[in-house]
Amino acid sequence: MKKLLIFAFAAIVLFGFKAINQKKITGIVTDEQGHALPGVSVVSDVSRAKTISDASGKYSISVSEKDKNLNFYYIGFLVKKMAIKQNTINAVMKPNNQALSEVVIVGNAKPMQKRNSTAYMAQADMTVSSSPPSILRNKVAGISIASQENTESYSSIAENGFHSAQNDPLSTFSIDVDAASYTNMRRFINNGTLPPPDAVRIEEMINYFDYHYQQPKNNVPVNIVTETANAPWNTAHKLVQIGLQGKTISTDNLPASNLVFLIDVSGSMYAQNKLPLLVSSFKLLTDQLRAKDKVAIVVYAGNSGLVLPATSGDKKTIIKDALDKLVAGGSTAGGEGIELAYKVATENFVKGGNNRVILATDGDFNVGASSDGDMESLIETKRKTGIFLTVLGFGMGNYKDSKMEILADKGNGNYAYIDNINEARKTLISQFGGTLFTIAKDVKLQVEFNPARVSAYRLIGYENRLLNKEDFNDDKKDAGELGSGHTVTALYEIIPVGINDSFSRSVDALKYQKPSKTNTVDNGELLTVKLRYKDPDGDKSRLLSKAVLDNPLSFTATSDNFRFATAVAEFGMVLRQSKFRQNASFDHAVSLAESAKGTDKEGYRSEFVSLVKSAKLLTKSSNLSLKDRLIMNGED
């Protein structure tokens, strides 16, 4: 009898319950021109299984037998609904012709609640508030969302002018390895508009690209490389390139990492190019981690919480599961999140290791410490802990570049803007060491110009990185960080002695003193480059120096590095409508860049050429004056 009961029970288990079968669906998502769309959300209609397309537009998703349709969501495109009739479903998405300036959640956040022992998740009451009729509404995955007018903010840039080498022979600035301005500019152009001038930081555009300078020798972490030729936009002037090459350390030899992912899950992060792209990006980074690395995850919305305590880098499934649980909703208590992230990083500090907070946000802080001054003071305090900061920007419409830049500059860190999954791959995989591992901190440059050879000089870009000449020898003065394998490039435009120019401004003769004539010896040197840096855990700087002879090459004899950096600078000056652009134009920048693409394995230099051509086309439909359009196209 007992055996009979056991058999009956087994029969019920085997036949009384129908197993839920899973079906794997794969495919590619493209636009109507056949271009792959990365970061598209693919969601089933019943089980709500979800995935995101990769850099090639490919996706793979497991759905239940109850699912009848797949829905494809992507900002700027109409929702695509496709019936599940086969195992391969390729989706072609159509653009949404209604101009959504930005998609954000409108609603009230619920308090963060503990879901399990390893995760907190920010939830939101997704009810649309009353709003003017002009505000567009849309539905994404069954959630009501609304558009919002553009509130992006950028710090004002007062462009560097020419300085007299006789009266002001020293030029001092902090290095800048950030590249956010380039990808943000690319986002504007790819979306069919020219970027605002203050969004164009020429040094960040130049430093977006790798220049493959010679590696440093011996135990020095950085090498100084220089090159000189005539300036292509004014052949009477000279152009000097100063390149820095950080020592490349193989991933296996990099020190252990103590990382804290600080993730903005506020309501404004709901858009497809924000939190979903952010999660995909951090999954790419997770795949690069080693067993000796540790990762914790902190989120912030109306308040902040610990999503994942410090977890070994080889527990990739646990880390990714925690990321998948994140949901956007609520206001943005950025200051509170930063406090908690640094607290967690401090508790897990690795002596001699890479201790870093990685902040991912659109920068739209509105609760707690939110003003630029408050955030600057907070970050300046936190950098004293020896914990570095990486800032990753996402999204558009309410993007606060000005805040992001301050956080990175003041927090011993770097700043990148992630506009698509390919950029995430470049920043977090291809440049893994450079983004996350500092080999030299507080890196400063001071260039002394020889008045016997130089009448006036101008540093192109770096306006927000300028230092006083006294700051160069002051080890208490903060400056930029250099990562493993990173390159930094700066360009000076020089007016030689004896060349008349329209940029130098005269002043009245002094009444009470006569200017002394400098007793210069013309030793053939144009300038001297001095560099100071500290070890990542050091407090005392070290000095490097290199003299540059006045022996310019013909422009055609210069390296690809020189010509390409020059092309990017020229494009930046035209985009900014710089008063120093002289004969610069889009067409000339294209010509220079095409001659200097080199091997271009990843295609970034070819992409740059396409962007310049697109920018030229956009000037025809912009609000610029006819005169400005003619000048930008070299037709003045």
Image (cartoon, rainbow, N blue to C red):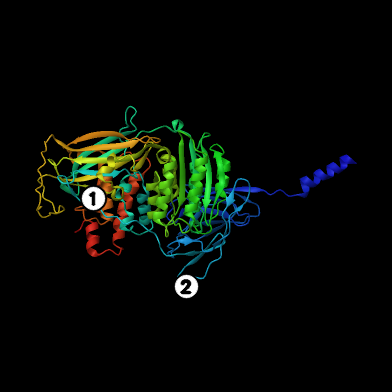
Q: Residue furthest front?
A: 512
Q: Quadrant of the N terminus?
A: top right
Can you tell which quarter of the image residue 192 is in? bottom left
Q: Nearer the viewer, residue 614 or 229?
A: 229
For residue 595, say whether it is visible. Answer: no
| Numbered mark located on residue 588 in the image | 1
State the residue at coordinates (67%, 48%): 21
Task: Name, please, the residue furthest toward the top.
Answer: 218
- The amino acid pointed to by label 2 is Pro
From the viewer's side, name the closer residue of 57 and 434: 434
Which residue does the numbered mark 2 point to in the structure image?
133
x, y percent for residue 300: 52, 53
Numbered disc 1: secondary structure: helix
* Residue 173 visible in rendering: yes
Which circle marks residue 96 in the picture? none
Q: Indicate the quadrant where residue 248 lies.
A: top left
Position of the C terminus, as image quadrant, is: bottom left
